Amino acid sequence: MLEGPPGTSKTTILSAITSEWGIPLLFVEGNADLTPSKLVGHHNPARVLREDYSADNFVPGPLVEAMQQGGFLYIEEFNRAPEDTLNTLLTAMADRSIAVPRVGRIRAEPTFRVIASMNPYDNVGTTRLSTSVHDRLNRLAVGYQDADAEERIVALRSGVSDPLGERLIRDAVALTRATREHDDVRQGSSVRGAIDTVLVATRLARLRGVDEPDAADYPELVFDAMIVALSGRIHLDEAAETTPEQVLREIWEDRFILEPHQAAPG
Protein backbone atom coordinates (compact mmCIF):
# COMPACT_ATOMS: atom_id res chain seq x y z
CA MET A 1 0.00 0.00 0.00
CA LEU A 2 1.43 3.35 -1.09
CA GLU A 3 -0.30 5.97 1.03
CA GLY A 4 0.14 9.58 0.13
CA PRO A 5 -1.38 12.58 -1.66
CA PRO A 6 -1.52 12.82 -5.47
CA GLY A 7 1.56 13.99 -7.30
CA THR A 8 4.15 12.33 -5.05
CA SER A 9 5.57 10.12 -7.84
CA LYS A 10 3.89 6.86 -6.79
CA THR A 11 3.20 5.81 -10.38
CA THR A 12 6.63 7.02 -11.49
CA ILE A 13 8.29 4.84 -8.85
CA LEU A 14 6.38 1.75 -9.99
CA SER A 15 7.10 2.49 -13.65
CA ALA A 16 10.80 2.70 -12.88
CA ILE A 17 10.79 -0.59 -10.95
CA THR A 18 8.83 -2.55 -13.56
CA SER A 19 10.95 -1.09 -16.36
CA GLU A 20 14.13 -2.15 -14.55
CA TRP A 21 12.75 -5.65 -13.97
CA GLY A 22 11.37 -5.92 -17.51
CA ILE A 23 7.84 -6.75 -16.40
CA PRO A 24 4.48 -5.09 -17.20
CA LEU A 25 2.69 -2.53 -15.04
CA LEU A 26 -1.08 -2.92 -15.29
CA PHE A 27 -3.04 0.08 -14.11
CA VAL A 28 -6.56 -0.10 -12.65
CA GLU A 29 -8.55 2.81 -11.28
CA GLY A 30 -10.48 2.00 -8.12
CA ASN A 31 -14.09 3.11 -8.33
CA ALA A 32 -17.63 1.84 -7.75
CA ASP A 33 -17.71 0.35 -11.28
CA LEU A 34 -14.73 -1.93 -10.69
CA THR A 35 -16.47 -5.31 -10.46
CA PRO A 36 -14.79 -8.69 -9.79
CA SER A 37 -15.37 -9.70 -13.43
CA LYS A 38 -13.59 -6.57 -14.67
CA LEU A 39 -10.65 -7.42 -12.45
CA VAL A 40 -10.45 -11.16 -13.14
CA GLY A 41 -11.81 -11.35 -16.69
CA HIS A 42 -14.78 -12.79 -18.58
CA HIS A 43 -15.73 -15.23 -21.30
CA ASN A 44 -16.25 -13.76 -24.76
CA PRO A 45 -20.07 -13.73 -25.15
CA ALA A 46 -20.03 -14.23 -28.93
CA ARG A 47 -17.72 -17.22 -28.71
CA VAL A 48 -19.68 -18.67 -25.80
CA LEU A 49 -22.83 -18.66 -27.95
CA ARG A 50 -20.97 -20.44 -30.75
CA GLU A 51 -18.69 -22.75 -28.80
CA ASP A 52 -19.99 -22.88 -25.19
CA TYR A 53 -17.71 -22.00 -22.28
CA SER A 54 -14.04 -22.96 -22.55
CA ALA A 55 -10.63 -21.75 -21.46
CA ASP A 56 -9.95 -20.60 -25.02
CA ASN A 57 -12.70 -17.98 -25.05
CA PHE A 58 -11.77 -16.52 -21.67
CA VAL A 59 -10.63 -12.87 -21.86
CA PRO A 60 -8.25 -12.25 -18.94
CA GLY A 61 -8.68 -9.14 -16.83
CA PRO A 62 -5.80 -7.11 -15.39
CA LEU A 63 -5.47 -9.35 -12.31
CA VAL A 64 -5.07 -12.53 -14.35
CA GLU A 65 -2.78 -10.76 -16.84
CA ALA A 66 -0.53 -9.53 -14.05
CA MET A 67 -0.40 -13.00 -12.47
CA GLN A 68 0.38 -14.77 -15.75
CA GLN A 69 2.98 -12.22 -16.88
CA GLY A 70 4.54 -11.67 -13.46
CA GLY A 71 3.71 -7.97 -13.52
CA PHE A 72 2.55 -5.37 -11.04
CA LEU A 73 -1.19 -4.82 -10.70
CA TYR A 74 -1.49 -1.20 -9.60
CA ILE A 75 -4.88 -0.24 -8.18
CA GLU A 76 -5.12 3.51 -7.70
CA GLU A 77 -7.60 4.87 -5.12
CA PHE A 78 -7.83 1.37 -3.66
CA ASN A 79 -10.39 2.35 -1.03
CA ARG A 80 -12.90 3.46 -3.67
CA ALA A 81 -13.39 -0.07 -5.02
CA PRO A 82 -16.37 -2.15 -3.80
CA GLU A 83 -15.72 -4.57 -0.97
CA ASP A 84 -16.56 -7.68 -3.02
CA THR A 85 -13.98 -6.61 -5.61
CA LEU A 86 -11.31 -6.19 -2.94
CA ASN A 87 -12.18 -9.60 -1.54
CA THR A 88 -11.43 -11.06 -4.96
CA LEU A 89 -7.83 -10.02 -4.44
CA LEU A 90 -7.44 -11.78 -1.10
CA THR A 91 -6.76 -15.26 -2.49
CA ALA A 92 -4.41 -13.90 -5.15
CA MET A 93 -2.50 -11.95 -2.51
CA ALA A 94 -2.38 -14.74 0.09
CA ASP A 95 -2.06 -17.90 -2.04
CA ARG A 96 -0.70 -16.34 -5.23
CA SER A 97 -3.31 -18.23 -7.23
CA ILE A 98 -7.00 -17.97 -8.07
CA ALA A 99 -9.58 -20.40 -9.42
CA VAL A 100 -11.44 -19.14 -12.49
CA PRO A 101 -14.65 -21.04 -13.32
CA ARG A 102 -14.43 -23.08 -16.55
CA VAL A 103 -10.78 -22.07 -16.92
CA GLY A 104 -8.97 -23.62 -13.99
CA ARG A 105 -6.46 -22.38 -11.46
CA ILE A 106 -4.26 -19.45 -12.41
CA ARG A 107 -0.93 -19.36 -10.61
CA ALA A 108 1.15 -16.21 -10.29
CA GLU A 109 4.69 -15.78 -11.53
CA PRO A 110 7.27 -14.92 -8.82
CA THR A 111 7.42 -11.21 -9.69
CA PHE A 112 3.63 -10.70 -9.45
CA ARG A 113 2.63 -7.99 -6.96
CA VAL A 114 -0.56 -6.18 -6.05
CA ILE A 115 0.23 -2.51 -5.42
CA ALA A 116 -2.48 -0.25 -4.05
CA SER A 117 -2.56 3.49 -3.42
CA MET A 118 -4.69 5.68 -1.18
CA ASN A 119 -4.98 9.42 -0.65
CA PRO A 120 -5.19 10.02 3.13
CA TYR A 121 -6.70 13.49 2.59
CA ASP A 122 -9.70 12.32 0.56
CA ASN A 123 -12.59 10.46 2.16
CA VAL A 124 -15.39 11.30 -0.29
CA GLY A 125 -16.79 8.16 -1.93
CA THR A 126 -14.35 5.89 -0.13
CA THR A 127 -14.95 2.73 1.89
CA ARG A 128 -13.26 1.47 5.00
CA LEU A 129 -10.91 -1.42 4.27
CA SER A 130 -11.60 -4.60 6.19
CA THR A 131 -9.14 -6.10 8.64
CA SER A 132 -8.57 -9.07 6.33
CA VAL A 133 -7.45 -6.70 3.53
CA HIS A 134 -5.23 -4.66 5.84
CA ASP A 135 -3.63 -7.88 7.12
CA ARG A 136 -2.36 -8.66 3.63
CA LEU A 137 -0.84 -5.27 2.91
CA ASN A 138 2.49 -3.67 3.72
CA ARG A 139 2.15 0.09 4.07
CA LEU A 140 4.60 2.69 2.80
CA ALA A 141 3.84 6.37 3.44
CA VAL A 142 4.87 8.55 0.47
CA GLY A 143 5.13 12.26 1.19
CA TYR A 144 5.99 15.34 -0.81
CA GLN A 145 9.58 15.80 -1.95
CA ASP A 146 11.69 18.59 -0.47
CA ALA A 147 11.99 21.94 -2.25
CA ASP A 148 15.26 21.12 -4.04
CA ALA A 149 13.88 17.85 -5.39
CA GLU A 150 10.69 19.54 -6.57
CA GLU A 151 12.70 22.23 -8.36
CA ARG A 152 14.64 19.52 -10.19
CA ILE A 153 11.40 17.77 -11.12
CA VAL A 154 9.88 20.99 -12.48
CA ALA A 155 13.06 21.77 -14.42
CA LEU A 156 13.00 18.29 -15.97
CA ARG A 157 9.30 18.36 -16.86
CA SER A 158 9.13 21.95 -18.08
CA GLY A 159 12.37 21.91 -20.05
CA VAL A 160 13.14 25.59 -19.32
CA SER A 161 16.72 26.57 -18.55
CA ASP A 162 17.14 30.29 -19.30
CA PRO A 163 17.39 32.89 -16.46
CA LEU A 164 13.69 33.70 -16.66
CA GLY A 165 12.79 30.02 -16.50
CA GLU A 166 15.11 29.38 -13.58
CA ARG A 167 13.42 32.10 -11.55
CA LEU A 168 9.99 30.84 -12.57
CA ILE A 169 10.91 27.38 -11.30
CA ARG A 170 11.99 28.69 -7.89
CA ASP A 171 8.91 30.87 -7.50
CA ALA A 172 6.47 28.25 -8.78
CA VAL A 173 7.78 25.63 -6.38
CA ALA A 174 7.72 28.05 -3.42
CA LEU A 175 4.16 29.18 -4.19
CA THR A 176 2.94 25.63 -4.71
CA ARG A 177 4.48 24.41 -1.47
CA ALA A 178 2.88 27.35 0.36
CA THR A 179 -0.58 26.05 -0.62
CA ARG A 180 0.06 22.99 1.56
CA GLU A 181 0.61 25.13 4.65
CA HIS A 182 -2.16 27.73 4.34
CA ASP A 183 -4.66 27.63 7.22
CA ASP A 184 -7.70 27.64 4.91
CA VAL A 185 -6.47 24.83 2.67
CA ARG A 186 -7.32 21.22 3.45
CA GLN A 187 -5.14 19.81 0.68
CA GLY A 188 -2.65 21.84 -1.31
CA SER A 189 -1.26 21.30 -4.76
CA SER A 190 1.32 18.72 -5.73
CA VAL A 191 4.38 19.46 -7.80
CA ARG A 192 2.18 19.14 -10.89
CA GLY A 193 0.83 22.60 -10.02
CA ALA A 194 4.35 24.04 -10.07
CA ILE A 195 5.06 22.39 -13.43
CA ASP A 196 1.95 23.90 -14.98
CA THR A 197 2.61 27.28 -13.39
CA VAL A 198 5.99 27.40 -15.13
CA LEU A 199 4.56 26.20 -18.45
CA VAL A 200 1.70 28.72 -18.39
CA ALA A 201 3.97 31.56 -17.25
CA THR A 202 6.51 30.78 -19.96
CA ARG A 203 3.89 31.14 -22.66
CA LEU A 204 2.41 34.26 -21.09
CA ALA A 205 5.89 35.76 -20.97
CA ARG A 206 6.25 35.29 -24.72
CA LEU A 207 2.88 36.92 -25.38
CA ARG A 208 3.64 39.87 -23.10
CA GLY A 209 7.26 40.33 -24.09
CA VAL A 210 8.65 39.54 -20.64
CA ASP A 211 12.12 38.09 -21.13
CA GLU A 212 14.01 39.12 -18.00
CA PRO A 213 13.55 37.74 -14.44
CA ASP A 214 13.74 41.24 -12.94
CA ALA A 215 11.15 42.81 -15.26
CA ALA A 216 8.65 45.10 -13.54
CA ASP A 217 5.65 43.07 -14.66
CA TYR A 218 7.19 39.70 -13.73
CA PRO A 219 5.25 39.36 -10.41
CA GLU A 220 1.91 39.95 -12.15
CA LEU A 221 2.88 37.39 -14.77
CA VAL A 222 3.46 34.80 -12.05
CA PHE A 223 0.15 35.63 -10.37
CA ASP A 224 -1.85 35.16 -13.56
CA ALA A 225 -0.12 31.84 -14.23
CA MET A 226 -0.63 30.49 -10.71
CA ILE A 227 -4.35 31.34 -10.78
CA VAL A 228 -4.74 29.18 -13.87
CA ALA A 229 -2.50 26.36 -12.66
CA LEU A 230 -3.31 26.18 -8.94
CA SER A 231 -6.88 27.39 -8.34
CA GLY A 232 -8.37 24.05 -9.36
CA ARG A 233 -5.78 22.01 -7.50
CA ILE A 234 -6.23 23.32 -3.96
CA HIS A 235 -9.08 22.12 -1.78
CA LEU A 236 -10.30 24.51 0.88
CA ASP A 237 -11.37 23.60 4.37
CA GLU A 238 -15.15 23.27 4.59
CA ALA A 239 -15.30 25.99 7.25
CA ALA A 240 -13.18 28.47 5.28
CA GLU A 241 -15.02 31.61 4.17
CA THR A 242 -12.82 32.39 1.21
CA THR A 243 -12.13 31.33 -2.37
CA PRO A 244 -9.16 29.61 -4.02
CA GLU A 245 -8.33 32.85 -5.82
CA GLN A 246 -8.22 34.81 -2.55
CA VAL A 247 -6.01 32.19 -0.93
CA LEU A 248 -3.62 32.29 -3.88
CA ARG A 249 -3.56 36.09 -3.77
CA GLU A 250 -2.48 35.93 -0.11
CA ILE A 251 0.26 33.44 -0.93
CA TRP A 252 1.45 35.57 -3.85
CA GLU A 253 1.50 38.73 -1.71
CA ASP A 254 3.51 36.96 0.99
CA ARG A 255 6.24 36.18 -1.53
CA PHE A 256 6.28 39.26 -3.76
CA ILE A 257 5.07 42.08 -1.53
CA LEU A 258 5.51 41.28 2.16
CA GLU A 259 8.80 39.44 1.75
CA PRO A 260 10.07 40.35 -1.72
CA HIS A 261 13.64 39.30 -0.92
CA GLN A 262 12.46 35.64 -1.13
CA ALA A 263 11.51 36.16 -4.76
CA ALA A 264 14.50 38.28 -5.76
CA PRO A 265 16.44 36.93 -8.74
CA GLY A 266 19.38 34.77 -7.71
Image (tube, rainbow, N blue to C red):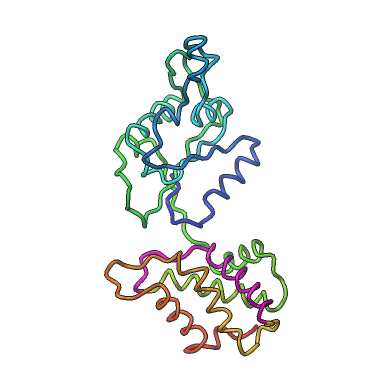
Residue displayed at 45% across by 47% down: 2
* Coordinates of residue 210 in the picture (x, y in percent): 67, 82
Please state which of residues 136 and 123 is positioned toward the viewer in this rendering: 123
The quadrant the C terminus occupies is bottom right
Please state which of residues 115 and 42 is positioned toward the viewer in this rendering: 42
Magenta-colored stretch includes residue 249: no
* Numbered range of the magenta stretch: 183-208
Indicate whether 60 appears above or below 132.
above
Q: Residue furthest right?
A: 162
Indicate whether 137 appears above or below 169.
above
* Coordinates of residue 127 in the picture (x, y in percent): 30, 44
Residue displayed at 54% across by 62% down: 192
* Coordinates of residue 102 in the picture (x, y in percent): 45, 13
For residue 38, what is the image quadrant?
Answer: top left
What is the magenta segment's predominant secondary structure?
helix
Indicate whether 143 appears above or below 135.
below
The quadrant the N terminus occupies is top left
Q: Residue furthest top?
A: 51
Magenta-colored stretch includes residue 205: yes
Please state which of residues 137 and 264 is positioned toward the viewer in this rendering: 264
* Coordinates of residue 188 in the picture (x, y in percent): 43, 66
Residue displayed at 56% across by 33% down: 71
Residue displayed at 35% across by 74% down: 183
For residue 26, what is the image quadrant?
Answer: top right
Please state which of residues 189 and 17 is positioned toward the viewer in this rendering: 189
